[in-house]
Amino acid sequence: MIQYFTNIDSRTVEISQPENGAWVNITPPLKQAEFEELSNKLDIPLDFLTDSLDIDEKARYELEDNVKLIVIKTPTENNSSINESDAYYITIPIVIILTHNQIITVNSFDNAAIKRFLTTFHNRSPEKRNMMVLKIFEKVVMNFLDHLKEINQRRNLLEQRLYAANRNEELLAIMRIQKSLVYFVTALRSNELLLMKLERTNFLGLNEDEKEFLNDLIVDTSQALEMANIYTNILSSTMDAFASIISNNLNLIMKRLTSITIVLTFPMLVASIYGMNVDIPYQHTSHAFYIPIIISIIISVVLSWYFMKKKLF
């Protein structure tokens, strides 16, 4: 679906044709025929429009026929997954295309960054295309930071439930968070390199104010990357600590089971001796049945006291 937006009297207005200074936003469902029509209408290389279809597209920029292409990665919830072990969040590319008169964004999935930009589009000046691109970058960074906060809250909750329950469901959920963080770290590192390269080469032809804003975005992206790395390290440490706890608990359980086995073995031994088909002491007395029982109880009590003293129970 192709949408055309312009800014009239600080109001976002959707129009039917791409006027000069308009923002063209392409969202799912994506159709090849629409790509071809827009490519011919705005004189854009077709592969610039279709690059967003590749979910593994890396953050980069490119110039062809005076048309600028920028690809940046943004996070989104993995709602389309049918596998319970898949990550909660994945990263997808946003394609930004700058022509002589328009700015075009292409999204293979609905994402919060573009929605945020749309809600603030009335504050933008479409003729300042560079600042519009930087504002999209800003929304992407904000999107990362919001999802990182959600991941950290979910991680804290799962840790508490994990230590209390020791269930496989919590372990699977933590693994999904870990996968999400891997996607985030990879995308943020790629975005950071892209922004630093844009700053170094001045690909967009920024003025001093825009350069300063870009520098702030680089700092924010670096902070988001650092947060993702910290959460990844914390999660790895948590998994290592939980593995040690499980191993320690298993050792304690094995000690208790071994102690219980030993306590039960001696009464069984006494009962086995008195159950032999041979003459045994006191077999003809009236208390012959109670003698092995009393001996077994005494041995069990003594062994239980000993193991409890050694804290093996």
Image (cartoon, rainbow, N blue to C red):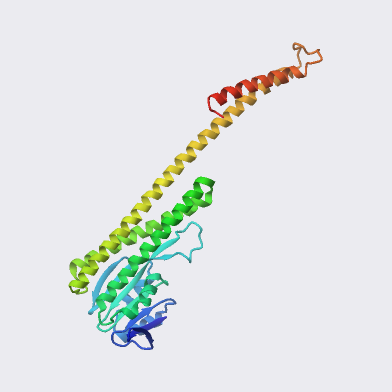
Q: Is residue 109 left or right of residue 213?
A: right
How many numbered marks are there? 0
| Quadrant occupied by the C terminus | top right
Given residues 18 and 43, the one toward you in this image is 18
- Tell me if residue 135 comes above or below residue 14 in the rendering: above
Q: Position of residue 203 (x, y in %)?
A: 21, 72
Q: Is residue 166 visible?
A: no
Q: Position of residue 21 (x, y in %)?
A: 28, 84
Residue at image coords 37%, 52%: 232
Q: Position of residue 286 (x, y in %)?
A: 82, 15
Residue at image coords 49%, 40%: 246
Q: Is residue 273 visible?
A: yes
Q: Position of residue 170 (x, y in %)?
A: 50, 51
Q: Is residue 116 left or right of residue 63?
A: right
- Tell me if residue 46 comes above or below residue 302 in the rendering: below
Given residues 61 and 247, the one toward you in this image is 247
Tell me the quarter of the picture where residue 193 sits.
Answer: bottom left
Tell me the quarter of the picture where residue 102 sits.
Answer: bottom left
| Quadrant occupied by the N terminus | bottom left
- Tell me if residue 250 comes above or below residue 232 in the rendering: above
